[in-house]
């Protein structure tokens, strides 16, 4: 890629970036949120056309008018924001636009399902090819995208944060797949905010900052610290939230919470879950994908359906929310795991997305005042460090990490007493992560109670005062901060 530039209204996303990728290597692209990583990869895969610069594949200049041109040239991309059709089956998504056909050119579902099964076996994925894609959790949807790239038999595979929604075990599984792809001669371009992962996988690393190429280096010749410094152009403080916090009064008490799962052999999504949350405390929930972490938070927030049994007490009083609105009014907030489907409102701008749950504060008479709305959202947008060309920019134009910061801003504006965070730093860069940790820590010290799930154990170990481990819907372990270790938690998470 030679001197690639790309401008969007109000931003220069890429400014004369030149990188060279060698056949058969795993090449990592690192950079802060908004550095231009996804944009560069979208140009490589034909989603966008560059304003300037040229692409050469195997020495020959190419021009891609769309993704199908890139696919024909052997380049496939797994997007950061998943792009699946929810109402279609898994197999139909994998072969979308390239359906296998049999007699009379009719779509051959059986052949597609069989091929899908073969790919899923490679990915060690348990999902049925006939399942409706919308019913899958993000982690499984990501595997569907990966299967799609595999089915193209691409020689260059771009993975834009493929593990951001995967748990450790699933990431390990993906790493085995990458090793197999490379063995088969493929070249991998890999974007990740997880430094350990980059250093485990990559042969070479390219760093982008503010749309510019900073450097490309051999992994063996650098260190995570050095790469981070190149990314942010400054040193980052990661300590400081380890000082003990002091738990205050009991905010939330959950007893024997059970959530049935009628159409499943196990019969329940959650069984007999009990926990307490105090003011000023961060309670971590660990578990593999499918362990029930998201279901637990959704049920607490009145978004898990009415079928649960057990008791949920808020300030000692039993509650039974039938809608998130009621949970909100009672001082709860939930940052969902699935940003695209359950978090963002793509038709609203940045300000609209942030003010959404606090619009009453921007009312002047019966109308929402634009200036009052701007005033309202400016604070949290600054506090979370959202990088945007303006408060009225389209939310869909923001980079993935910055969209996430907008959603966190939205909930901070509601002044919650209890903040439920479902994998909140998914896709957030190291610098912003440290800032977000500091923000959560500060709010906790001011009396907020937080329940936090994360697919990254180090995150739970850094932030949480206590950690509860779920496995297949049951509590299989509880650790105080000083006794929690990765090994201990993993053992409880895989119990049974
Ligand atoms: N379709 C678009 N319209 C307008 N602006 C865009 C668009 N796509 C990207 N941008 C802007 O270009 C810049 C680079 O975005 P990009 O998505 O490439 O960042 P990124 O490095 O992938 O970040 P992240 O780590 O958050 O995913 C950002 O400032 C973003 O707001
Ligand atoms: Mg991106």
Image: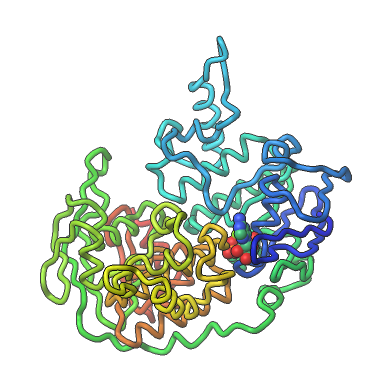
Which residue is at the far right?
Answer: 59
Question: Seen in the image, is 286 located left or right of residue 54?
Answer: left
Q: Is residue 241 above or below residue 67?
A: below
Tell me where residue 6 appears, x and y as whole percent.
73, 58
Query: Which residue is nearer to you in this view: 320 or 257?
Result: 320
Q: How many marks?
A: 0
Quarter the N terminus occupies: bottom right
Instruction: Give me the residue at 16% from left, 65% from top.
Output: 312
Tell me where residue 111 appears, x and y as whole percent.
53, 22
Q: Is residue 230 above or below residue 65?
A: below
Query: Which residue is nearer to you in this view: 232 or 387?
Result: 387
Which residue is at the far top?
Answer: 104
Which residue is at the far left?
Answer: 317
Residue 192 appears in the figure = no
Instruction: Give me the residue at 54% from left, 64% from top.
Output: 393
Q: Write down the quadrant of residue 355 in the picture.
A: bottom left
Instruction: Give me the residue at 75% from left, 68% from top.
Output: 212
Q: Write down the quadrant of residue 71 in the picture.
A: top right
Q: Quadrant of ligand 2?
A: bottom right
Instruction: Give me the residue at 58% from left, 38% from top.
Output: 148
Tell me where residue 472 appears, x and y as whole percent.
31, 52
Tell me where residue 340 appears, x and y as whole percent.
46, 54
Query: Which residue is nearer to you in this view: 293 or 347?
Result: 347
């Amino acid at each position: 890629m030679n001197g690639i530039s790309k401008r969007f209204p109000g931003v220069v996303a890429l400014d004369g970036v030149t990188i060279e990728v060698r056949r058969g290597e795993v090449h990592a692209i690192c950079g802060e949120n908004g550095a231009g990583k996804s944009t560069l990869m979208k140009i490589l895969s034909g989603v966008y056309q560059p304003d300037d610069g040229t692409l050469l594949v195997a020495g020959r200049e190419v021009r891609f008018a769309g993704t199908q041109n890139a696919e024909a040239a052997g380049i496939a991309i797994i997007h950061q924001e998943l792009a699946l059709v929810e109402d279609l089956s898994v197999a139909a998504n994998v072969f979308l636009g390239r359906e296998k056909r049999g007699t009379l050119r009719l779509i051959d579902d059986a052949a597609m399902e069989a091929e899908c099964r073969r790919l899923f076996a490679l990915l060690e994925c348990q999902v049925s090819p006939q399942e409706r894609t919308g019913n899958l959790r993000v982690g499984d949807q990501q595997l569907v995208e990966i299967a799609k790239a595999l089915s193209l038999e691409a020689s260059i595979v771009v993975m834009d944060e493929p593990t951001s929604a995967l748990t450790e075990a699933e990431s390990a599984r993906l790493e085995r797949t990458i090793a197999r792809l490379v063995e088969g001669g493929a070249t991998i371009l890999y974007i990740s905010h997880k430094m350990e992962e980059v250093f485990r996988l990559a042969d070479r690393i390219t760093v982008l900052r503010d749309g510019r190429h900073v450097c490309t280096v051999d992994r063996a010749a650098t260190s995570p610290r050095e790469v981070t410094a190149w990314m942010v152009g400054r040193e980052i403080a990661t300590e400081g939230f380890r000082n003990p916090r002091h738990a205050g009064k009991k905010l939330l008490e959950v007893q024997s919470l059970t959530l049935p799962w009628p159409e499943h052999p196990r019969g329940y999504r959650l069984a007999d879950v009990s926990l307490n949350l105090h003011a000023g405390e961060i309670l971590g929930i660990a578990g593999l994908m499918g362990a029930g972490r998201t279901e637990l938070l959704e049920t607490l927030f009145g978004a898990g359906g009415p079928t649960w049994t057990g008791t949920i007490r808020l300030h000692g009083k039993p509650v039974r929310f039938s809608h998130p609105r009621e949970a909100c009014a009672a001082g709860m907030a939930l940052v969902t795991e699935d940003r695209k489907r359950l978090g963002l409102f793509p038709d609203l701008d940045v300000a609209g997305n942030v003010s959404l749950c606090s619009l009453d504060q921007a009312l002047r008479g019966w109308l929402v005042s634009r200036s009052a709305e701007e005033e309202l959202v400016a604070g949290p947008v600054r506090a979370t460090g959202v990088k945007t060309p303006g408060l009225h920019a389209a939310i869909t134009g923001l980079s993935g990490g910055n969209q996430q910061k907008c959603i966190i801003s939205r909930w901070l504006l509601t002044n919650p007493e209890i903040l439920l965070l479902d994998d909140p730093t998914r896709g957030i860069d190291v610098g912003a992560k440290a800032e977000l940790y500091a923000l959560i820590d500060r709010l906790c010290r001011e009396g907020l109670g937080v329940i936090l799930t994360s697919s990254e154990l180090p995150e739970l170990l850094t932030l949480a005062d206590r950690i509860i481990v779920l496995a297949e819907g049951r509590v299989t372990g509880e650790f105080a901060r000083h006794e929690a270790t990765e090994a201990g938690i993993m053992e409880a998470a895989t119990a049974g």
